[in-house]
Image (cartoon, rainbow, N blue to C red):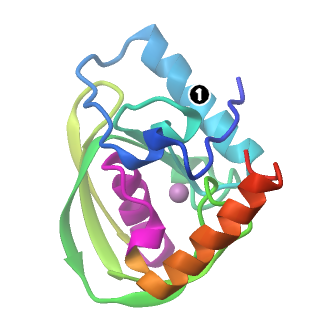
């Protein structure tokens, strides 16, 4: 099923999610299927469980946006274990629709995570994939990309969002 995306302002987005301790269950497989469906329905390249209201350390990524099945990635309990280089580029978030900002990130990132069977693996990504590893892992620790922009830009964005909330035009 496709879940609605939780918008900025909901506290579930700003707290650390719970670790996953049970693997390879029918429920987990179904949940991952729902996460991919929800991500594709919103045309995202990554989605974290808190963004559909579940405070669990699970993220899905597909930088090909459904074009290339081998790009489908599941990260459970991910940790960033190595970063190098830098890239500056536009970043957005399905939970903060209508906004994009330049965000400085590492260019090459290694993440360590569990797969659906609970086995630990490492993946190294560059460019957009590196950015997705950082953005989605951040989500699972309650951090949004706006914590990586200047306080001035962040305050401006929050004021615009408040206006939208008051107008009833925000989730
Ligand atoms: Ni996001």
Image-based side of 55 in relation to 42, left or right: left
Point 32% across, 81% down: residue? 106
Magenta stretch: residue 146 in it? yes
| 87, above or below 19, in the image | below
Q: Residue furthest front?
A: 166
> For numbered disc 1, what is the local secondary structure?
helix
Q: Quadrant of residue 110?
A: bottom left
* Spot occupied by residue 71 in the image (x, y as percentages of width and height): 53, 54
Is residue 131 in view from this perspective? Answer: no
Point 45% across, 79% down: residue? 127
* Spot occupied by residue 154 in the image (x, y as percentages of width and height): 51, 77
Q: Give the quadrant of the N terminus.
A: top right
Nearer-the-camera pick, 52 or 120: 52
Q: Quadrant of residue 45?
A: bottom right
Nearer-the-camera pick, 77 or 156: 156
Image-based side of 126 in relation to 111, left or right: right
Image-based side of 170 in relation to 27, left or right: right
* Spot occupied by residue 75 in the image (x, y as percentages of width and height): 37, 43
Is residue 12 in view from this perspective? Answer: yes
Point 29% across, 70% down: residue? 109
Nearer-the-camera pick, 73 or 166: 166
Q: Which residues are magenta?
A: 126-147
| Residue underneath mark 1 | 33
* Spot occupied by residue 121 in the image (x, y as percentages of width and height): 23, 45
Q: Tag count in the figure?
A: 1
Magenta stretch: residue 131 in it? yes
Point 67% across, 56% down: residue? 65
Magenta part mainly helix, strand or loop?
Answer: helix
Would you call the spot at circle 1 few (<14 residues within 10 Å), some (14-19), or many (20 or more)? some
Q: Residue furthest top?
A: 26
């Amino acid at each position: 099923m496709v879940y609605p995306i939780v918008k900025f302002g909901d506290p579930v987005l700003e707290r650390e999610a719970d670790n996953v301790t049970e693997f390879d269950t029918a429920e987990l497989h179904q949940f991952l299927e729902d996460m991919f469906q929800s991500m594709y329905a919103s045309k995202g390249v990554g989605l974290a469980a808190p963004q559909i209201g579940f405070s669990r350390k699970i993220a899905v990524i597909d930088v090909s946006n459904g074009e290339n099945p081998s790009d489908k990635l599941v990260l459970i309990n991910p940790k960033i274990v190595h970063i190098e280089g830098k890239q500056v580029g536009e970043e957005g978030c399905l939970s903060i629709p209508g906004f994009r900002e330049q965000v400085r990130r590492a260019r090459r990132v290694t993440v360590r995570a569990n797969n659906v069977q609970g086995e630990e693996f490492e993946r190294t990504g560059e460019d957009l994939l590196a950015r997705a590893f950082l953005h989605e892992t951040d989500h699972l620790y309650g951090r949004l990309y706006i914590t990586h922009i200047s306080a001035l830009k962040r305050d401006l964005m929050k004021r615009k969002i408040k206006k939208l909330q008051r107008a009833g035009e925000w989730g």
